[in-house]
Image (cartoon, rainbow, N blue to C red):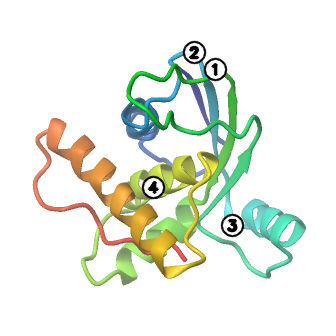
């Protein structure tokens, strides 16, 4: 799996954890091991520009996903996953920090960025949360991935509650 993490935000983030949780999520979703992903960490101004340009919404957001080859997880256990370029995930640590502080179960900026990385991966794989059933599926899968990753690392407690919209 080729995953690049590029921090352009000026904020110190745990790039290793972002890389590790992205790899864990892609492996768990059975994405081809030669697929490629890019994660870019930007400041609020850059995120706001992307948010306006691509979503026509004001202000910065927490995470945006830009799929390339529209890869999907294999539907059967014996199905060979396709190889390709997943796309880009863009994260904003300043928004993540605020969300972590405002969440019912307060958590760190890095914990929020880990959650947002998984959220972005799932969007790249075609998951969405517009409809209640889609939201339940995506957020359930997101929590399972974050909890599984944290459990493998001996981190205690459940994953942060989803704060992404």
Q: Is residue 83 above or below residue 99?
A: above
- Expressed as whole percent of the image width and height from the top left, the position of residue 121 reads 54, 46
Q: Residue 100: image x %, image y %?
A: 38, 72
Asked whether disc 4 touches disc 3, contact meaning CB atoms under 8 Å apart, the reply is no
Q: Choose the circle earlier in sequence order: 4 or 1.
A: 1
Q: Residue at x 41, y 64 (%)?
A: 137
* Distance in Å between CA atoms under marks 4 and 1: 26 Å
Categorize mark 3 by other alpha carbons within 10 Å: few (<14), some (14-19), many (20+).
Answer: some
Q: Which residue is mark 2?
A: 34
Mark 3 and mark 2: span between their CA atoms? 32 Å
Q: Are marks 1 and 3 in contact (CB under 8 Å)?
A: no
Q: Secondary structure at mark 2?
A: loop
Mark 2 is surrounded, within 10 Å at the Cα level, by few (under 14), some (14 to 19) or many (20 or more) other residues, namely few
Report the residue marked by disc 4: 113
> Residue 93: percent from the left, percent from the top?
54, 60
Q: Is 137 on the left-hand or right-hand side of 91? A: left
């Amino acid at each position: 799996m080729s995953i690049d993490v590029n921090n352009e935000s000026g904020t110190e983030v745990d790039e290793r954890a972002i890389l590790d949780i992205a790899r864990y999520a892609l492996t768990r979703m059975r994405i081809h091991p030669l697929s490629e992903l890019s994660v870019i960490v930007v400041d609020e101004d850059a995120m706001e520009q992307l948010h306006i340009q691509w979503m026509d919404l004001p202000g910065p957001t927490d995470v945006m996903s830009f799929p390339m080859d529209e890869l999907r997880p294999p539907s059967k256990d014996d199905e060979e996953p396709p190889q390709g370029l997943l796309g880009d995930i863009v994260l904003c640590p300043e928004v993540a920090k605020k969300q972590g502080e405002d969440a019912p179960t307060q958590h760190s900026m890095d914990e929020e960025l880990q959650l947002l990385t998984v959220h972005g991966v799932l969007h790249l794989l075609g998951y969405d949360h517009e409809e209640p059933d889609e939201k339940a599926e995506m957020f359930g899968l997101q929590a399972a991935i974050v909890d599984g990753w944290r459990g493998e690392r001996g981190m205690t407690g459940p994953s942060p509650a989803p704060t992404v919209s």
